[in-house]
Amino acid sequence: MTRKLTYGQAFNEAVRQAMAADDDIFCAGEDIGAFGGVFQTYAGLQAEFGERRVVDTPISEQAIIGLGVGAAASGLRPIVDIMFMDFLCVAFDQIVNQAAKIKYMFGGAATIPLTITTGGGAGLSAAAQHSQSLEALLCHIPGLKVVQPSNPYDAKGLMTACIREDNPTIMVLHKRLLGMQGEVPEEAYEIPLGKANILREGSDVTVVGWGRMANEALDAAEKLAAEGIDVEVIDPRTLQPFDTATVVESVRKTNRVVIVHEAVRFGGLGGEIAAQIQEEAFDYLDAPVARIAAPFSPVPFSPVLEQIYLPSADDIEDGIRGVLARPGV
Amino acid sequence: MELSTEVQMDLHRRMVRIRLFEEAAGKLAEAAKLPGFLHLYVGQEAVASGVCAALTDADQITSTHRGHGHLVAKGGQFNEMMAELMAKSTGYNKGKGGSMHISNLDVGMLGANGIVGAGAPIAVGAGFADKYRGEGNVAVAFFGDGSTNIGAFHEAANMACALKLPVVFACENNEYGEFTAREKTMAITDIIDRAAGYGMPGVIVDGMDVVAVHEAATEAVARARRGDGPSLIEAKTYRYYNHHGVQNLGLKYRTDDEVAEWRERDPIFTFEEHLIANGTASRADIDAIWAELRADIETAIEFAEASPVPTADQLLVDVYTEMAPTATEVSA
């Protein structure tokens, strides 16, 4: 049965159902116990499963990830929360040098079924240290999987898949989507990691975007549909491993592509995706691959500046018009 | 209380195994037969041996750059260890980890670690799993004096105490962090001064005295198993060789006289004198142990040298655990 849940509630339900089914799953993080997490994404879980399984930790990001790594190597299936994505930087050794590499370094002997959850993205005037989209840093590290849902249905299905994963996986919830409502099945279900979702089919241009930007892309597509411009919107859902095949197949059909992300443009995933597209579909392109992304600056505090900083449906619309302005071959 | 003959001979055997493995590794490195870096444990044998003799196979340890000794003491086998140091596919890590990441989960050794201080948070996780399961197992974090200056150690120590986890923090204070003397990098002399800040007991032991280390470890492990939380053991010890490699004398950051002073208190030879004086073992018994273990080392070197290197198709194996397709997908 399906009913409406918010993005945050859908995530919470995935955790709750997984914990109810498997005692090896526990959660640990700052303020997630009695308080339920600063975004309430862990609300009610300690009341249901107790302090043994939903653990309030000190403000110690390295030790939180280390707790997860050591417990995972010991056979448990930890879910550890790092409140804001920016704070992953505090724990980067444990994420990059330990969690991601232990399996390989140990010749395959270790398995690290660790899920790291965190809140990413801008739009709350939370300024430069509570607003970043750092997925490119994570996707650069062999051994990690990186996921960002764009809607409530995906939040539940992808989180269920992350918990089931036998690899270290980082689930990035977008803070501005936490209240987004959508249809969510009551039963547990998984959305496979590494498979993109075509949110909207179209024939004139492909837009690739994830998290909140997937929704901005849909808004742009709806607006342009009134003009007879048929936009295909692809949400990769999983950023590492990236589903290049689905994007390339779409580009071979539309011959034009716009990639949009909230992270800064330089060194962002857009560059990597563009490179893969030109490697695999160069002869199909009628226009250079366009990137819509944040400028190379920290996220500003000022709401006025932040709005300028963030890519929007209008920016995506401009990008689409740009690639369509090029004559076809 | 005098330890039983069996325990004393076990402690001795662990130390000799470490010494022989490390000296052999050093010679192989000099002969350019080991790729990469080598951090030798020689001089510190009493610490790993004394602590690991207090543990079961189900107890887990995390280690340091200088990790061979910990793995040997925890029950690691010479063949697979030597093969790993030689980067062979028969090594514990299939030739993908080497000296700095050598590990064997079957004996509860969660890896040497190339990042100073990084093992301590992982030991907290292992200890968390022990408490979660309630089977009475414990985790031990080995770390050097230098790593108590890095944030990961402080976070791990505080968290272990806050959550009252069965973790023993075993500090090997060998007086040098890499190539810099301890007194230049911290304003305290004793690492246990830090213990009170986390609310755990700390005890200093002579790290050249395997019995003293073992007794302190036995007490700390028992406390952890009882559910009374973490302890810090500081073993004052010394590494005979340089931070890495096989040079031992003529180093810029310490004197040869200092090395000689510590060597006079060699953990193995002083313990052997004790064993003989107490009638626990004869010189002939001890010589036979060395001879037996030397033969094992020779066998391990032959095994490692005869083993194949990894094949090219192993390059991308084990980056990820392969996942079976999910059975419960539902469509949107």
Image (spheres, coloured by chain):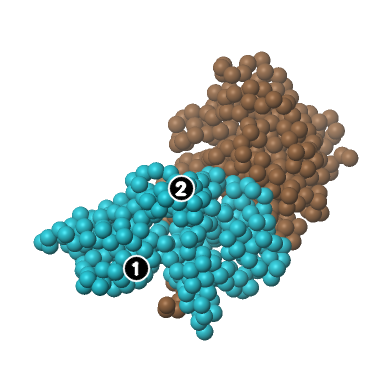
Instruction: Looking at the picture, tell me which residue is in the foreground, A225 or A305.
Output: A305
- Say which chain is brown: B
Instruction: Looking at the picture, tell me which residue is in the foreground, B124 or A309.
Output: A309
| Element at label 2 | loop
**Total labels drawn:** 2
Q: Chain of mark 1?
A: A
- Tell me: B111 left or right of A121: right
- The residue pinned by badge 2 equals A302
Reading the chain from its start, which is encountered first: label 2 or label 1? Answer: 1
Q: Can the viewer see residue A157 in this picture?
A: no
Look at label 1 and name its amino acid. Leu
- Say which chain is cyan: A
Q: Kindly identify the residue that appears in the image at 52 percent across and 80 percent down.
A: A3
Look at label 2 and name its amino acid. Ser
- Tell me: B292 left or right of A317: right
Work out which quarter of the rendered image holds the C terminus of chain A and state it.
bottom left
Residue found at the very far bottom of the displayed protein: A1
User: For residue B272, which quarter of the picture?
Assistant: top right
| Element at label 1 | helix
- Tell me: B50 left or right of A157: right
Q: Kindly identify the residue that appears in the image at 74 percent across and 61 percent down.
A: B134
Q: Kindly identify the residue that appears in the image at 36 percent across and 44 percent down.
A: A296
**Rounded to the nearest whole Å, what is the CA distance between mark 2 and mark 1?**
27 Å
- The residue pinned by badge 1 equals A218
Q: Chain of mark 2?
A: A
Q: Is residue A33 above or below residue B242?
A: below
